[in-house]
């Protein structure tokens, strides 16, 4: 049995569960754990539950807070949305051929989650199948004949069989499922490989067959039976088994397994399960740990990822390319070096692309070119989605695996610490910009546009137009055009337009750059709107009567004018102006005072211009927002993190390990996991080497009064080593003062001075330890009466173990100068508004000054 043994230096750490990793003793397999498994445990991180995230296109290299190229985020489902396991692992997929419904099968530490992604922007967690025995960091899933086959490194786990058609009729999700059948022929297994053409499964890394191929007949899924064993080359980490149709005539039609065997690529003929034959066993230079492999679709080449070469040799991610046209003598052709240093983990080939889950660098998609090129294999990274944006280093965090085989083209990625990412790759070659653009008038109110495209089958075009000429703002006026000419029948007379054209592939996902612009004008009636930049500012007047002042620059008439203005208002930040939300019309000036704005509520405004010469309004959607407030006076500042409260600043400690699941919240943010009252609280997040602050203010404490701070909190913080402190400082002061609390802090830092990220000294009182029963705390602010102050909740962790984090809710500061309520003029305009806090919060990070 050829299994690499653990270094004597690593073994005590792992068996003791050091560094915050799950102790190996808590998930004892039936065979010795491999070196790569133990290294992964040492990198294990806990991350707190966070909010889902919906459709976020990849634009200008980012999808929310995630670096990307040509991959959109359709949905993020955090692990809290799948039963809140401590971690995820493998992922696979299943499509019901009758209905076309698509499902992600997500490996959890505690079992397997089933998530319907048919509507990928509104995924549904259907329920979980619990582990057969105990929890484990490692689980693997494959499918055959509408059944899932699941193995784990958990001791005694065997192979679970689950009838996936159950997912089609879940009435009230989530539910707890039961396994359909169970195969006990082995205990633990590292991976399960299935040849769907033959109906055989191959468990690898078990305590049987010397860790090699344990073969199971699953042709009747509910009654799996032992079929054979291959043990001659010892431990197999992962494999791909196929009915061979490649160019090697000696083996065509045979069932062949391509095995990643720790330090070799080992090819085995398993056609006769009772007498499998090793065809070849090939070493290669630079071996770290031969982890996983996948064939190109023509079965001429094999792509191999080595899981430890990046850490062992310090190079970037390598994808090794093998010529396997002669199965008896595989030949290593070279490698592709990724632009990042991350560890590669799992990859799957689809067409001319390989989809790679590369831990901290996330999903990487490579286009496979001429793999036999004289200068080495020609491979190009064409798309990526970085689920771990704070680091691409060679550590075992981030993306575990990817499944790219859904008919919809959606890809799903499992993130160890965070959850499920549902992604839409946009893979194609961007066409060149159209050439020979022309625009000619053709009668009244008509301009004919023509161009030369690529001539590619299925190419479509979008026509863009700019009122005022090529230097003005363009808008799309036609899309999906299949010909190389188009007539603009809405052109206004008496104005100049700029035109340009974009070519797209048949899906509309990949686009050329815009063509060069040409200008044209035509005769006929002038019907154009004015040229108008939209609303410039919106600001409260802070008077007893509610008032928001709107200001804008004047519009330029296109058809002689004069120009008039209309004002629209709503509490919906994405509202579209219509007569139902219009509050003013026929305005001649360049400002408007809204005396009907509701007190203390954030509202959104749009102003549009109308050219009375044409009767046409412009269509801008420039939105500004403001909250009508009364004059500043003595009162109580209060916030509870509820919807309608001001959002947190997006600044935070970007060097922290892990990545924000909700990218707009890098440091503290809103959470609905624990709350004292209402629906949400403020949450610190939690990760190693973290120093983040939630800041209230600046806030003027009323002179001559004794102000008091009050708040409620719960926390799960590594006792003594990590902690949370409440501090105050006058605005502009160089340092912060820790506040005394009543009751006292529950503990103190005891961490060898400054081993935490913020650098707190020993004996500094702090929130530390664990208490998930909400408790209220107060602090007198009498010493700062009459001063403008900031108050912060600062959370600090060291580089080792972690707790869940720190939650704060229902904050109140008495005798502060806060805006009073104002009185709206209800006779002008009435709308259905909801209240919200009006004083801003911020988030910051960094060590103590």
Image: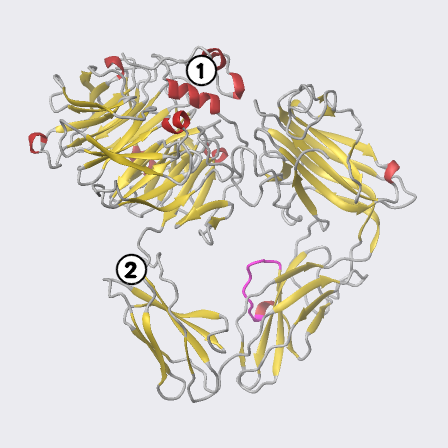
User: Which quadrant would the N terminus be assigned to in this image?
Assistant: top left
Q: Which residue is mark 2?
A: 506
Q: CA distance from mark 1 to mark 2?
A: 51 Å
Q: How many marks are shown on the rendered structure?
A: 2
Mark nearer the N terminus (1 vs 2):
1
Q: Secondary structure at mark 2?
A: loop
Q: Is residue 202 left or right of residue 835?
A: left
The image quarter in which residue 215 lies:
top left
Label 1 crowd (10 A; few <14 / some 14-19 / many >=20):
many
Q: Position of residue 493 (x, y in %)?
A: 45, 86
- State the SS at label 1: helix
Q: Height in image: 577 above or below 845?
A: below
Q: In percent of the image, x 17 and y 33: which residue is there?
A: 324
Which quadrant holds the C terminus? Answer: top right
Foreground of the two, 145 or 282: 282
Q: Which residues are magenta?
A: 571-579
Q: Which mark is residue 75?
A: none
Taking the image as shown, residue 84 lies to the left or right of residue 759, namely left
Determine whether 52 is above or below 200 in the image: below
Q: Is residue 691 left or right of residue 129?
A: right
Q: Quadrant of residue 739?
A: top right
Instruction: Depth check: give the residue in front, 678 or 368.
Output: 368
Residue farthest front in this picture: 375
Instruction: Tell me if residue 579 comes above or below residue 52 in the rendering.
Output: below
In terms of depth relative to the viewer, which is nearer, 708 or 380?
380
- Residue 318: x and y in percent read 34, 34
Classify mark 2: residues with Cα within 10 Å, few (<14), some (14-19) or many (20+).
Answer: some
Instruction: Find disc 1 in the rendering and name its residue.
Output: 24
């Amino acid at each position: 049995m050829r299994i690499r043994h653990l270094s004597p230096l690593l073994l005590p750490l792992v068996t003791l569960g050091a560094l915050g990793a799950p102790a190996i003793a808590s998930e004892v397999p039936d065979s010795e754990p491999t070196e790569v498994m133990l290294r992964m445990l040492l990198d294990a991180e806990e991350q707190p539950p966070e909010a889902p995230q919906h459709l976020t296109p990849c634009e200008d290299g980012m999808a929310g807070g995630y670096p990307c190229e040509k991959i959109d985020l359709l949905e993020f489902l955090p692990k809290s949305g799948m039963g809140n396991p401590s971690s995820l692992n493998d992922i696979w997929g299943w499509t019901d051929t009758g209905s076309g419904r698509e499902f992600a099968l997500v490996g959890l530490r505690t079992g397997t989650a089933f998530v319907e992604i048919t509507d990928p922007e509104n995924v549904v967690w259907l329920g979980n199948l619990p582990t057969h025995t105990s929890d484990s960091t490692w689980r693997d899933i494959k499918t055959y004949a509408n059944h899932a086959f699941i193995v784990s490194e958990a001791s005694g786990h065997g192979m679970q069989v689950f009838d996936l058609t159950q997912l089609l009729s879940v009435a009230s999700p989530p539910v707890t499922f039961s396994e359909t059948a169970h195969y006990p022929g082995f205990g633990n297994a590292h991976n399960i490989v299935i040849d769907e053409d033959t109906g055989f499964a191959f468990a690898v890394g078990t305590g049987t067959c010397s860790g090699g191929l344990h073969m199971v007949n699953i042709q009747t899924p509910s009654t799996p039976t032992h079929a054979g064993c291959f043990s001659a080359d010892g431990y197999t980490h992962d494999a791909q088994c196929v009915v061979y149709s490649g160019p090697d005539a000696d083996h065509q039609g045979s069932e062949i397994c391509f095995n990643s065997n720790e330090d070799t690529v080992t090819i085995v003929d398993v056609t006769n399960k009772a007498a499998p034959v090793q065809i070849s066993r090939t070493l290669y230079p630079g071996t770290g740990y031969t982890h996983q492999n996948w064939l190109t679709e023509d079965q001429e080449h094999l792509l191999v990822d080595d899981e430890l070469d990046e850490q062992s040799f310090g190079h970037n991610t390598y994808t090794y390319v093998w010529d396997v046209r002669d199965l008896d003598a595989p030949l290593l052709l070279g490698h592709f070096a990724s632009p990042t240093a991350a560890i590669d983990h799992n990859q799957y080939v689809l067409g001319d692309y390989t989809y790679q889950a590369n831990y901290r660098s996330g999903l990487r998609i490579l286009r496979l070119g001429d793999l036999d090129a004289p200068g080495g294999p020609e491979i190009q990274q064409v798309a990526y989605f970085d689920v771990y944006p704070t680091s691409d280093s060679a550590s075992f965090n981030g993306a575990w695996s990817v499944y790219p085989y859904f008919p919809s083209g959606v890809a799903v990625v499992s993130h160890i610490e965070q959850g499920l990412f549902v992604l839409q790759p946009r893979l194609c070659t961007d066409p060149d910009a159209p050439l020979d653009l022309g625009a000619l008038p053709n009668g009244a109110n008509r301009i004919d546009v023509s161009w030369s495209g690529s001539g590619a089958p299925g190419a479509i075009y979008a026509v863009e137009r700019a009122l005022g000429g090529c230097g003005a703002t363009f808008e799309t006026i036609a899309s999906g055009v299949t010909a190389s000419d188009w007539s603009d029948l809405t052109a206004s007379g008496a104005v100049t337009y700029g035109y340009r054209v974009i070519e797209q592939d048949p899906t509309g996902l990949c686009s050329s750059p815009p063509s060069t612009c040409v200008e044209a004008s035509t005769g006929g009636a002038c019907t154009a709107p004015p040229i108008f930049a939209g609303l410039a500012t919106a600001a409260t007047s802070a008077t007893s009567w509610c008032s928001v002042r709107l200001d804008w620059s004047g519009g330029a008439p296109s058809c002689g004018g004069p120009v008039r203005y209309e004002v629209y208002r709503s509490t919906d930040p994405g509202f579209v102006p219509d007569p139902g939300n219009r509050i003013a019309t026929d305005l001649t000036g360049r400002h408007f005072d809204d005396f009907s704005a509701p007190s203390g509520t954030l509202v959104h405004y749009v102003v549009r211009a109308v050219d009375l010469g044409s009767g046409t309004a412009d269509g801008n959607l420039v939105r500004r927002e403001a909250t009508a407030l009364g004059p500043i006076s003595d009162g109580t500042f209060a916030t509870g993190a509820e919807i309608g409260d001001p959002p947190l600043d997006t600044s935070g400690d970007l060097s922290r390990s892990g990545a924000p699941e909700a990218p707009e919240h890098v440091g503290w943010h809103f959470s609905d996991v624990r709350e004292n009252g209402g629906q949400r609280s403020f949450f610190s997040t939690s990760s190693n080497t973290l120093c983040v602050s939630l800041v209230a203010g600046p806030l003027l404490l009323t002179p001559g009064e004794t102000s008091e701070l009050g708040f409620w909190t719960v926390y799960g913080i590594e006792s003594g080593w990590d902690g949370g402190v409440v501090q105050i400082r006058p605005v502009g002061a160089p340092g912060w003062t820790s506040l005394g609390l009543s009751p006292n802090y529950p503990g103190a830092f005891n961490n060898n001075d400054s081993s935490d990220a913020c650098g707190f000294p020993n004996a500094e009182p702090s929130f530390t330890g664990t208490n998930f029963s909400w408790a209220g705390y107060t602090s007198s602010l009498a010493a700062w009466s009459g001063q403008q102050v900031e108050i912060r909740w600062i959370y600090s962790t060291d580089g080792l173990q972690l707790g869940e984090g720190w939650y704060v809710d229902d904050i109140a500061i008495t005798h502060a100068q806060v805006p009073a309520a104002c009185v709206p003029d209800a006779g002008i305009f009435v709308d259905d508004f909801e209240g919200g806090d009006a004083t801003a919060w911020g988030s910051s990070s960094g060590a103590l000054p």
